Each structure stands twice: as structure tokens, then as C-alpha cells.
């Protein structure tokens, strides 16, 4: 069984803000970052790569050289719970975080942790539809670079084992059943293998808590 790694201690981020300093009311970017940067553009900072995105914790993630020290499970849970599956084309809002919990429940016990975090790379690259992935020339190489760093940070293998990919595909079929009202030709096959109750979409806060609870249950530190 693959075991999760303990989270490495995070360094001070680029603007030397300490983790202990207060955050804004939404629990997002530190107040001192906001006060210090509210009248300027992030593009004014020559130390920031034009291939880096600003994270909710006030740090930057560079797609050319992903830094695992900016990652933690709270960040992953927050982003995935606010990220809608199927690029938003569902009857109701349905998050990647809730999808991840479902995949984990359909995965053999030794790979449930990997099942929960199989989409953790989307914390940084988003949930890009498969058709779009095929036409964006550099997407797959960027995705691979990001996933290798994210997966290593959390102690799961890259590429993912077949059991996780199988559970992910099954979850997709059940999600299409409940979120689109579409019965895929594989629904009967997967229904014989898995018993999945009708999916009740969660709002972001509930999905975030479900994701973190599952992470704790599976031994995440």
C-alpha cells in the first residue's frame, strides 16, 4: 500500500510574509499581502515568472519549475471544492473535490489515498475538458510536469495505477447518469461492479469538509 508523506514545512513565500500573520476574512491571501500589493500589478514584480499563478495562500506556483513547498492539503481541498466538474455543464454545481471522494470510495483499499488525490494536479492546472486537452499542444507535457511534482509530494505514484483509472472512469459514468440524466452504454457494466447511490451534489464548503475528512480517514498527515 502506498502511504502518504507528511507535509514538508513551508518556507516563507516570495514577499517574506510569515505564515503566522493574519489572513483576510475569507481565509485566503494574507492581509499584509493585500495591503502591500493592492495598488500595483503582480506584473510589476520582476521576481515573478510570467508562467506563475498567484495562489490563495499568497504564494506563487511556476509551471516551468513547480515547487512542492507551496502545496498543502488545505490548499488542494479549497481549490478542488471550488472547481466544477464537466467545465460547469451539469444540472447543479458538482465539484472536483466531491468527485475525488467518490473515486476514492470505488478504488481498492490499497489505492484509496491515490484515488482521493488523483486530480490534485488540478489545484494548479484546473479541470480542462478532454477534448480541449487534445488541441492544446503543450497541455499534456505541462500536466505531466505538474502531476509528477504534486503526486510525489503526497506520496502517490505517477502514473496512477490502473485501479484508480478504472474507478475514475466508473465515477464518470455514474456522474453522467445523475448530473446529466444520460445513461452511457457502460452504465449497466459498471452497475454490476459498483453500487453507487444517486449522487447528491454538495456545495463547496460541504465538499471541502468531505474531502478533508476522507483525507484524514485514509491516514493523511
Image (cartoon, helix red, strand yellow):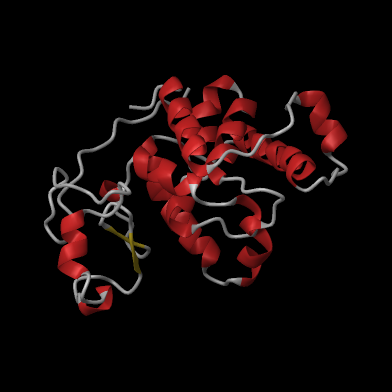
In the image shown, does 1 or 67 lie closer to the viewer? 67
Q: Quadrant of the C terminus?
A: top left
Q: Is residue 98 left or right of residue 216?
A: right
Instruction: Please say whether residue 86 is visible from this viewpoint.
Output: yes
Looking at the rendered structure, the number of numbered marks drawn on it comes to: 0
Image location (x, y in percent) of residue 67: 29, 53
- The quadrant where residue 45 appears: bottom left
Q: Is residue 164 above or below residue 135?
A: above
Residue at 63% x, 36% y is 162
Instruction: Please say whether residue 2 is visible from this viewpoint.
Output: no
Q: Is residue 118 left or right of residue 152?
A: right
Q: Is residue 115 above or below residue 134?
A: above
Image location (x, y in percent) of residue 91: 72, 50
Q: Is residue 114 left or right of residue 48?
A: right
Q: Is residue 8 left or right of residue 116?
A: left
In the image shown, does 115 or 159 lie closer to the viewer? 115
Image location (x, y in percent) of residue 145: 43, 57
In the image shown, does 202 or 192 lie closer to the viewer? 202
- The quadrant where residue 102 appears: top right
Residue at 52% x, 37% y is 207
Amino acid at each position: 500500500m502506498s502511504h502518504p508523506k507528511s507535509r514538508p514545512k513551508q518556507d516563507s513565500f516570495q514577499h517574506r510574509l510569515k505564515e503566522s500573520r493574519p489572513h483576510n476574512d475569507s481565509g485566503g491571501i494574507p492581509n499584509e499581502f493585500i495591503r502591500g500589493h493592492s495598488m500595483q500589478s503582480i506584473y510589476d514584480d520582476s521576481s515573478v515568472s510570467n508562467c506563475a499563478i498567484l495562489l490563495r495562500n499568497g504564494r506563487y506556483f511556476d509551471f516551468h519549475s513547480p515547487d512542492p513547498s507551496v502545496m498543502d492539503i488545505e490548499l488542494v481541498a479549497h481549490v478542488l471544492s471550488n472547481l466544477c466538474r464537466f467545465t460547469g455543464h451539469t444540472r447543479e454545481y458538482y465539484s472536483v473535490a466531491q468527485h475525488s471522494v467518490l473515486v476514492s470510495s470505488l478504488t481498492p483499499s490499497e489505492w484509496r489515498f491515490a484515488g482521493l488525490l488523483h486530480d490534485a494536479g488540478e489545484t494548479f492546472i484546473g479541470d480542462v475538458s478532454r477534448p480541449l486537452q487534445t488541441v492544446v499542444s503543450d497541455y499534456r507535457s505541462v500536466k505531466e510536469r505538474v502531476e509528477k511534482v504534486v503526486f510525489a509530494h503526497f506520496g502517490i505514484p505517477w502514473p496512477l495505477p490502473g485501479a484508480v483509472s478504472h474507478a475514475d472512469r466508473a465515477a464518470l459514468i455514474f456522474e453522467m447518469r445523475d448530473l446529466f440524466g444520460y445513461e452511457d452504454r457502460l452504465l449497466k457494466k459498471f452497475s454490476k461492479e459498483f453500487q453507487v447511490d444517486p449522487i447528491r451534489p454538495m456545495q463547496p464548503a460541504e465538499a471541502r469538509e468531505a474531502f478533508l475528512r476522507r483525507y484524514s480517514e485514509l491516514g493523511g498527515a
